[in-house]
Image: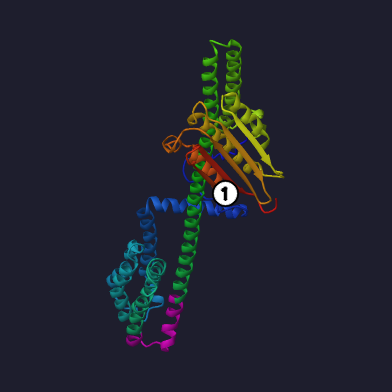
């Protein structure tokens, strides 16, 4: 018996994604370096913020040491005011990622003082870093308020120090603002797109795991159904043979010996089928070749199945009409298992004087099987809590067939199982 099995490797956690496949060596190195910096930033964000803010503070103080006079509208601004404004533009950047709009608003008084005094500090362009973080993290409408926050000091400066035309003072800042905002939006869209791809990959992984679990559950159900059919039928045959042998032991020792021999043959056959079935559950995946190549029961095995039931003491009449043609192995197995389970129930519940008939008819578009017995077993004994009838219905439903099972009217009484299994269109 060959039953497919799906093996899954053990999972120890999500593996890191490698996005550098096919990239040049230099590109891969840069990507690895960037990923390390990002990982360090995720673990210790304050360290990175302190270092970056320190760089900005140092650059602002260098400009405040005297370089600001080269571009200032008024080079007589007090040094202490220049120092305060330089620190006001650079120190708030420590909180640029968590509160970018608040940082820009904190810079607004220093920007107004810078414009009104005519110092024209280069540190005022650090406002663009806050604008970049706003474009990265906040709703897009926040950029409108950010633009107003940047343009108000420009209007104050243009009014206090009307050097050149207004467009010469406004246009460069507008270009800078637009460029930084577009850069932030581009990075943001890329991050969101990458995050959506990662989420999609995670969802696909979850769906794959769910499909694997469903496949494993279906496989366990199929194996349980096969084991029920194999064990139930063979144990019923062995029980019938043992009862008959015990009855014949006193009057006919030869009949008793034949019964014991049949019990041994049936037991060996059951063990062989169980070994074949359980081999698919081996963890190492090294099932013996015999288990891999052994065929499943087919329609040609019905005669042997009926002979075994006859040997167990239940008279069975088998009739076959029509030509089975090229019936697929799965449908043949379904017919075989339904007949097997029906005869097993007849052995269990039919009583000592029961007889059974099996009629198999191969039509042009369907296979019809009717198993009838004359046993005395009624509804209570045939439709208990076991898996027999449920297993037959599950097998039938797999191929869009119908199964009817129930008692016959008295007299004469008995039980009938009728299977209607449609063929595939091309058969």
Q: Is residue 341 magenta?
A: no
Which residue sits at x=67%, y=54%?
A: 425
Residue 252 visible in the current orientation: yes
Counting from the top left corner in percent of width and height, residue 21 is at 60, 52
Residue in the image at 52% along x and 32% along y: 346
At a point 41% along the width and 78% down the height, the residue shown is 71
Residue 361 falls in image quadrant: top right
Which is the main secondary structure of the residues drawn in magenta? helix
- Residue 157, picture quadrant: bottom left
275 up-or-down from 405: above or below: above
Report if residue 10 is visible in the image.
no
User: What residue did someone put label 1 on?
Assistant: 401
Between 157 and 382, which is closer to the camera in this rendering? 382
Task: Name the one closer to the observer, 178 or 293.
Answer: 293
x and y percent of residue 183 in the render? 47, 70
Q: Is residue 174 magenta?
A: yes
At mark 1, the secondary structure is loop
In the figure, 339 relative to 401: above or below?
above
Q: Which residues are magenta?
A: 158-177
Residue 172 in picture, x, y percent from top left:
45, 80
């Amino acid at each position: 018996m060959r039953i497919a099995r799906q093996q899954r490797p053990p999972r120890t956690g999500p593996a890191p994604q490698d996005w550098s496949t096919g990239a040049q060596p230099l590109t891969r190195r840069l990507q690895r370096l960037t990923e390390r910096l990002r990982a360090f930033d995720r673990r210790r964000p304050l360290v990175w913020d302190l270092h970056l803010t320190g760089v900005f503070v140092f650059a602002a103080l260098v400009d405040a040491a005297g370089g600001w006079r080269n571009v200032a509208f008024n080079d007589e601004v007090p040094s202490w005011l220049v120092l305060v404004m330089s620190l006001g533009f650079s120190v708030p950047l420590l909180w640029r990622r968590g509160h970018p709009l608040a940082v820009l608003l904190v810079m607004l008084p220093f920007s107004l003082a810078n414009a009104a005094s005519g110092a024209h500090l280069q540190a005022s362009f650090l406002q663009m870093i806050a604008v970049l973080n706003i474009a990265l993290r906040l709703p897009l409408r926040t950029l409108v308020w950010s633009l107003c926050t940047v343009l108000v000091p420009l209007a104050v400066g243009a009014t206090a120090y009307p050097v050149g035309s207004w467009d010469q003072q406004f246009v460069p800042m507008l270009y800078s603002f637009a460029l930084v905002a577009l850069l932030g939006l581009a990075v943001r869209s890329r991050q969101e797109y990458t995050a959506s791809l990662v989420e999609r990959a995670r969802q696909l992984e979850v769906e794959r795991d769910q499909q694997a679990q469903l496949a494993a559950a279906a496989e366990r159900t199929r194996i349980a159904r096969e084991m029920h059919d194999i064990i139930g039928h063979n144990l019923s045959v062995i029980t019938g043979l043992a009862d008959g042998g015990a009855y014949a032991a006193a009057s006919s020792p030869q009949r008793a010996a034949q019964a014991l021999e049949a019990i041994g043959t049936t037991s060996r056959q059951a063990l062989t089928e169980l070994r074949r079935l359980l081999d698919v559950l081996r963890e190492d995946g090294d099932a013996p070749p015999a288990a891999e190549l052994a065929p499943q029961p087919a329609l040609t095995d019905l005669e042997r199945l009926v002979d075994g039931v006859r040997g167990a003491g239940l008279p069975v009449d088998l009739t076959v009409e029509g030509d089975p043609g090229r019936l697929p192995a799965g449908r043949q197995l379904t017919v075989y298992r339904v007949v097997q389970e029906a005869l097993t129930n007849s052995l269990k519940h039919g009583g000592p004087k029961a007889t059974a008939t099996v009629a198999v008819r191969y039509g042009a578009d369907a296979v019809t099987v009717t198993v009838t017995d004359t046993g005395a077993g009624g509804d209570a004994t045939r439709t208990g809590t076991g898996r027999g009838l449920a297993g037959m219905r599950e097998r039938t439903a797999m191929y869009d067939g119908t199964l009817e099972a129930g008692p016959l009217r008295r007299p004469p009484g008995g039980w009938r199982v009728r299977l209607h299994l449609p063929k595939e269109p091309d058969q």
